[in-house]
Image (tube, rainbow, N blue to C red):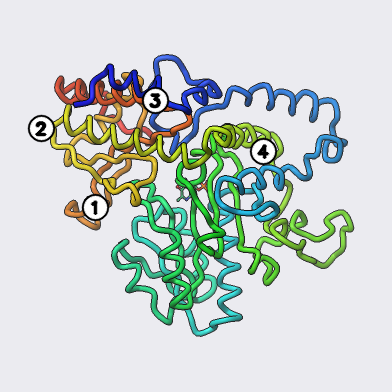
Amino acid sequence: MTTLQDCRALDAQDPLRSLRDLFALPPGVIYLDGNSLGVMPRTAPARVADMVTREWGTDLIQSWNKNHWFELPQKVGDKIARLIGAGPGEVVAADTTSINLYKVLSAALNIAAQDAPTRRQIVSERSNFPTDLYIAEALCRERGFELVLVEPEGIAQALTAQVAVLMLTHVNYRTGAMHDMAAITAAAHAEGALVVWDLAHSAGAVPVDLSAARADFAVGCGYKYLNGGPGAPAFVWVNPLHTDRCWQPLAGWWGHAAPFAFTPDYQPAPGITRYQCGTQPMISLAALECGVDTALAAEPLGGMAALRAKSLALTDLFIQLVEERCAGHSLGLATPREHAQRGSQVCLTREEGAYAIVQALIARGVIGDFRAGDPSTGSGRTGYQDILRFGFTPLYIGFLDVWNAVEHLKQVLESSEWQRPEFSRKHAVT
Ligand SMILES: *Cc1c(COP(=O)(O)O)cnc(C)c1O
């Protein structure tokens, strides 16, 4: 049995505990939703204010040179690269995850068209984040490809001679299940397919080594575990073997080799710069840089390996305490217990009341979120039941937070507080 005192002791021994001070955590809140929108770094308000008042307000257009605005997507990209096993000059922070996915998926199809033109399928997971599936569906319609959706256990079998691209999200947004990136990439390559990885729930949360895995393309999100702020620019990585082989489809002037030559024809820039499209949002990039710096602040303390160790300790503890203290309340576990298969979140299932329980917790200051099940698939599959989702960002969540979150959950369940009518009212964003 782990006690409240044990949790306090774990916090006191935590080598990463100082990192919490980098964040402006609102008082009275246990924030278990950093996998949806990361907490604001303390440096962000002043940095954004400086960019607005001095760089924009005073320096105006000179800022593109004087304040290095023009290189900011590459500068932030190089910082993100350190978190995902990519080299300098291989990542650019730009646009959104959805848009970047369109670029890389399209480029992957271009490469497949050169190397393996008879392959006409994109394979993905049915429970992938919907925008990934929608973008793939749109591209398939445009190009005459077929989108094949499988369950995780069916991926290996789906890798046939028809497959051009395997597109997966490394950590599943619904269940927190994590794929073995190196093994799946190797299996796909052995069958002649390219692999696109979405790192939305991985970057800053779990160790990623794109280079070691010999992945082909990757995209990821700036506002989740990278703490870049709402709508922060996303990022894109392309294996240097492929970068200069083809254009990406959104060939805007920021991806041109010489944008200020203003030539009527397009000449793609060498390297990842060609994956930029148009003018990038400088104020948002400034905030994103503050967020990425919070994850890099862990480097002298053991980096992603230390963050991973803490993340697993937090999620292990949450699972254990829920099972010990909330037993008899019909909660199920959708997240794998095996460490190698778990991201940085824990998802609980419940036949009834998942949405209302999450709302009751939020009213108590314990912020998680709800993800609806998929009615077309039935309730027999864990992955498709209604989910109570709790993200554990090891940069700012502590062991006492875990204890307190479970105590609130226990009280909400025992008191039937969640059955109050106001907790069943649906909001636009869940
Ligand atoms: C959060 C998330 C996205 C978000 O895409 P946007 O274009 O930023 O809205 C995409 N894919 C996955 C897997 C995600 O988790």
Q: Earlier in the sequence, mark 3 or mark 2?
A: 2
Above-or-below relation of 272 to 165:
above
Q: Is residue 61 left or right of 287 when viewed as pictured?
A: right
Q: Which mark is residue 398?
A: 3
- Density class for disc 3 (Cα within 10 Å; few <14, some 14-19, many ≥20) is many
Q: Residues within 10 Å of mark 4 (few under 14, many from 20)?
A: many
- Relative placement, left or right, of 375 versus 286 is left
Q: In this view of the protein, which residue sits in the foreground, 78 or 310?
A: 310
Amino acid type, residue under disc 3 in the picture: Gly
Question: Front-most of 102 and 50?
Answer: 50
Q: Crowding at label 2, few (<14), some or many (≥20) Cα neighbours within 10 Å? A: few
Q: Residue at x 54, y 57 (%)?
A: 210
Which residue is under mark 1?
375
Q: Which residue is mark 4?
A: 285
Is disc 2 placed on a helix, strand or loop? loop
Depth order, front residue of 159/10: 10
User: Which of the 4 image quadrants contains residue 128?
Assistant: bottom left
**Eye-nearest disc, 4 or 1:** 4
* SS class, disc 4: helix
Q: Amino acid at mark 2?
A: Gly
Q: Secondary structure at mark 1?
A: helix
Q: Earlier in the sequence, mark 4 or mark 1?
A: 4
Q: Are marks 2 and 4 in contact (CB under 8 Å)?
A: no
User: Does label 2 point to a residue whose CB lies under 8 Å from ligand 1?
Assistant: no
Quadrant position of residue 126: bottom left
**Three-letter amino acid code of the residue under disc 1:** Pro
Q: Earlier in the sequence, mark 1 or mark 2?
A: 2
Q: Is residue 34 left or right of residue 93?
A: left
